């Protein structure tokens, strides 16, 4: 079943066409990867899908509802969450606070009951904390929960962003270059993490250009080049596709 | 969290000191300044929520302050309301201004917001000055009543002082509880990175409006008390300079640290009065002192305190708590 579908999505920045007439369908429960060289429009597509930008034309549906042009926090509340390619960590919050704040949009107590510290508020806080700790244990950061997030090493800040996004109870998570800046060990751990995110019932939309990661973990791949989709298929099909090879390695003399 | 414990300890010390200060000051004038300082403490607690916690540089404090003062003044003298309903009205009224001002302006970021709120403060002052039929224009409003408990009216300045101090303490506790709640974390999240907050499902504009309203509710109470303390108000007090002074209180205290903002409020209420003997020079000296703090101690009082505690811990050989393990 299609969870996310893009229909003829186009985005212009002035005269530059960043995403060109893109059709894309992501099915529920799969690990889908969007790859392509730098500047091919991968991050722009993420921005369009999560409401950070509005498309010039076309539309994006999530669970059958239009999300393009919707405000970002509403889209997240609908169950589509993202992480950022350039880390966006809250510099004054601890690791645990990041994850509890991720669950903020699912909590129900009002501001007055929070000031009066009613029983419901205390119960809610307890529940949110337990859930945040479960998620931190899941990504392997539980022993760092009281650290200021900014003092975590880079790779762990990436994991924290994933934990924070998981705390919003998403149905689909868009990971924008999660392996950037990670060590070899960290990125092979990431492969396991991505699989276990899917095993929690969350559809994974992976954006990256690290071939080892993408080919290892994804079930279906779409390739962008200059904003246009040039190929779509299983990792094996993608690896053998001449257009993809050309986009990544350039045109060889033989094919010219 | 260690930080909120440090905050609570500092708050207790500050309020105990303020309670002890009243009998120690002999001059009638400085007793009056002390009462003003406590009223400023209430208002700066409001500013702490929107500026310190949520990071929005709000330069329209004089507008909130003016509106709150006039609501209490007019409600008691012209509408015949009692002090208590009028105080609630001024709190709610300024809180409502938070919505009115917040919804259109809070999509603006950083300095754009500052400029807009400067405009808001100035417009408020001109309305108070020129809408004579309602506000009494430049002549102001007279005979504003003092608070009363049954038949007991707080005409005595010392009684009024302790009453204001009690309210200030209650509001500081409310602000501290709010800061430790999930909303406090959301305020800080929006301050640190608005886009990231949006991305995890937080309506950052809504959170900012909420912080603005909280600020208004607090400032309304302080402003109402101000009218009542002076028993006479006129529009020329609520100037841009005063808005800057409130922002400076937070800066001197250290952004995001409530006890710092409170000390900042007390210091910056007394400083101009104590420098008044310098006459024409006093603004220059006052400016230099503030500039010195911002340049040499940019973390303000909070930064100095945290630096001191950190050095002491290092000296005791406890080392840094969070190394890269």
Image (cartoon, coloured by chain):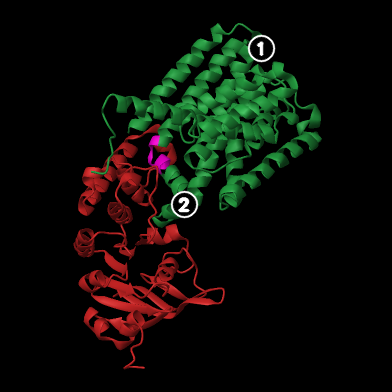
Chain colours: A red, B green
Chain containing the residue with disc 1: B
Q: CA distance from mark 1 to mark 2?
A: 45 Å
Residue at image x 22%, y 58%? Answer: A186
For the stretch drawn in magenta, what is the main secondary structure?
A: helix
Left/right of residue A16 with respect to residue B196 in the rendered view: right
**Which residues fall within the magenta stretch?**
B180-185
Residue at image x 64%, y 24%? Answer: B226
Q: In x, y percent, where is residue B156?
A: 62, 10
Instruction: Read off the residue under disc 1.
Output: B29
Image: A46 above or below B112: below
Instruction: Return the residue nearer the eye: B28 or A171.
Output: B28
Residue at image x 58%, y 50%? Answer: B103
Q: In x, y percent, where is residue A143?
A: 21, 43
Image: B144 above or below A199: above
Residue at image x 55%, y 10%? Answer: B22
Image: B208 above or below A239: above
Q: Disc 1 or 2, which lies upstream in sequence?
A: 1
Image: A149 above or below B9: below
- In the picture, which quadrant includes the N terminus of chain B? top left
Residue B82 appears in the picture as rendered: no
Instruction: Read off the residue under disc 2.
Output: B194
- What is the secondary structure assignment of the residue under circle 1? helix
Is residue B324 within the magenta segment?
Answer: no
- What is the secondary structure assignment of the residue under circle 2? helix
């Amino acid at each position: 079943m299609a969870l996310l579908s893009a229909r003829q999505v186009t985005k212009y920045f002035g005269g530059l066409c960043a995403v060109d007439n893109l059709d894309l369908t992501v099915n529920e429960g799969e690990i889908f990867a969007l790859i392509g060289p730098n500047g091919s429009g991968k991050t722009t597509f993420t921005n369009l899908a999560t409401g950070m930008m509005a498309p010039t034309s076309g539309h994006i549906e999530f669970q059958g509802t239009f999300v393009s042009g919707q405000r970002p926090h509403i889209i997240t509340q609908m169950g589509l969450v993202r992480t950022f390619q350039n880390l966006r960590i809250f510099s004054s919050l601890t690791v645990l606070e990041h994850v509890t704040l991720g669950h903020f949009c699912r909590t129900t107590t009002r501001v007055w009951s929070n000031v009066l510290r009613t029983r419901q508020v205390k119960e809610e806080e307890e529940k949110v904390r337990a859930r945040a700790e479960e998620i931190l244990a899941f990504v392997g950061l539980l022993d760092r929960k009281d650290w200021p997030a900014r003092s975590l090493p880079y790779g762990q800040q990436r994991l924290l962003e994933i934990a924070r996004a998981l705390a919003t109870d998403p149905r689909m998570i868009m990971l924008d270059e999660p392996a950037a800046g990670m060590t070899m060990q960290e990125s092979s751990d990431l492969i396991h993490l991505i699989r276990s995110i899917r095993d929690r019932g969350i559809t994974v939309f992976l954006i990256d250009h690290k071939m080892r990661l993408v080919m290892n973990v994804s079930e279906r791949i779409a390739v962008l080049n200059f904003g246009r989709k040039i190929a779509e298929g299983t990792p094996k099909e993608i690896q053998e596709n001449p257009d993809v090879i050309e986009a990544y390695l350039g045109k060889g003399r033989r094919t010219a | 969290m260690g930080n909120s414990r440090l905050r609570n300890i500092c708050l207790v010390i500050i309020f105990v000191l303020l309670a002890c200060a009243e009998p120690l000051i002999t001059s009638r004038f400085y007793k009056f300044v002390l009462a003003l300082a406590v009223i400023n403490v209430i208002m700066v607690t409001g500013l702490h929520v929107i500026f310190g916690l949520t990071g929005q540089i709000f330069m329209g404090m004089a507008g909130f302050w003016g509106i709150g003062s006039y609501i209490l003044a007019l409600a008691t003298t012209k509408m015949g309301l009692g002090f208590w309903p009028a105080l609630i009205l001024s709190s709610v009224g300024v809180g409502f201004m938070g919505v009115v001002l917040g919804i259109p302006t809070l999509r603006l970021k950083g300095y754009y917001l500052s400029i807009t709120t400067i405009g808001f403060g100035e417009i408020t002052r001109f309305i108070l000055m020129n809408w004579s039929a309602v506000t009494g224009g430049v002549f102001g409003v007279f005979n504003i009543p003092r608070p009363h408990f049954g038949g007991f009216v707080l005409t005595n300045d010392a009684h009024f002082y302790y009453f204001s101090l009690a309210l200030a303490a209650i509001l500081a506790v409310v602000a501290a509880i709010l800061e430790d709640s999930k909303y406090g974390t959301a305020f800080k999240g929006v301050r640190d990175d608005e886009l990231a907050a949006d991305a995890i499902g937080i309506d950052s504009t809504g959170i900012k409006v909420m912080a603005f309203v909280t600020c208004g509710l607090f400032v309304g109470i302080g402003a109402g008390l101000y009218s009542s303390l002076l028993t006479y108000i006129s529009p020329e007090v609520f100037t841009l300079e005063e808005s800057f002074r409130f922002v400076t209180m937070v800066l001197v205290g250290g952004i995001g640290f409530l006890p710092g903002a409170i000390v900042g409020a007390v210091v910056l209420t007394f400083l101009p009065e104590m420098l008044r003997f310098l006459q024409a020079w006093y603004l220059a000296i006052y400016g230099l002192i503030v500039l010195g703090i911002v340049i040499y101690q940019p973390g303000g009082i909070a930064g100095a305190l945290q630096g001191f505690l950190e050095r002491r811990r290092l000296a005791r050989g406890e080392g840094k708590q969070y190394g890269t393990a």
